[in-house]
Amino acid sequence: MATTKLRLGPLPKQDMVKMMVSLPAALRADLERYAAMHSQLYGEQVDAAALAPHMLAWFLKNDRGFRRQGR
């Protein structure tokens, strides 16, 4: 596999809280595939559950409409 840059870089260490979500099977498969690519690229094994909070945080940080409404 060629070296690919992913928008989500190495994961920072954070305190976490548990939240249960339901995902479509196709989305879970894509998340698992992304996790495999991320693990290979950064040399640290991660799974989709570990990546999801960081992906959601990135999405919210970069959503202009959400940012315009303030916190």
Image (spheres, rainbow, N blue to C red):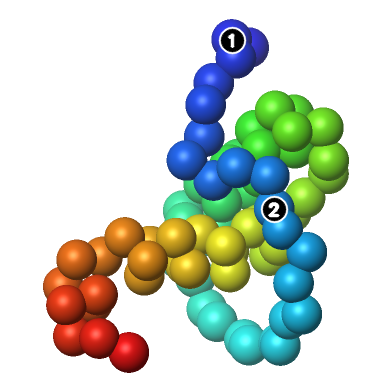
**Place of residue 30 in the rendered image (x, y in percent of width and height, measured from the top left):** 51, 46
Q: Distance between the residues labelled 2 and 1?
A: 21 Å
**Which residue is disc 1 drawn over?**
2
Q: Residue 11 carries which label?
A: 2
Q: In this view, does 10 lie to the left or right of 2?
A: right
Q: Look at the image and tell me whether residue 60 can be seen.
A: yes
**Place of residue 64 in the rendered image (x, y in percent of width and height, measured from the top left):** 19, 66
Farthest residue in the top direction?
A: 2
Q: Name the mark nearer the viewer: 2 or 1.
A: 2
Q: Which residue is drawn at 69% across and 53% down?
A: 11
- The answer to which quarter of the image holds residue 38 is top right
Residue type beneath disc 1: Ala
In the picture shown, does residue 12 fall above or below 41?
below
- How crowded pointer 2 is (Cα within 10 Å; few <14, some 14-19, many 20+) is rated as few
21 and 37: which is toward the camera: 37
**Place of residue 37 in the rendered image (x, y in percent of width and height, measured from the top left):** 65, 33
Q: Do the residues labelled 2 and 1 touch (CB within 8 Å)?
A: no
Q: Is residue 10 left or right of residue 69?
A: right
In the picture shown, does residue 42 fall above or below 34?
above
Q: Give the structural element (helix, strand or loop) at label 1.
A: loop
Residue type beneath disc 2: Leu
Q: Which residue is drawn at 70% across and 28% down?
A: 41
Q: Look at the image and tell me whether residue 29 can be seen.
A: no
Q: Give the structural element (helix, strand or loop) at label 2.
A: loop
In the picture shown, does residue 59 fall above or below 19?
above
Q: Residue at x 68, y 65 (%)?
A: 49
Quadrant of the drawing holding the N terminus: top right
Q: In this view, does 4 lie to the left or right of 61?
A: right
**Place of residue 13 in the rendered image (x, y in percent of width and height, measured from the top left):** 78, 64
39 and 24: which is toward the camera: 39
Q: Residue at x 59, y 10 (%)?
A: 2
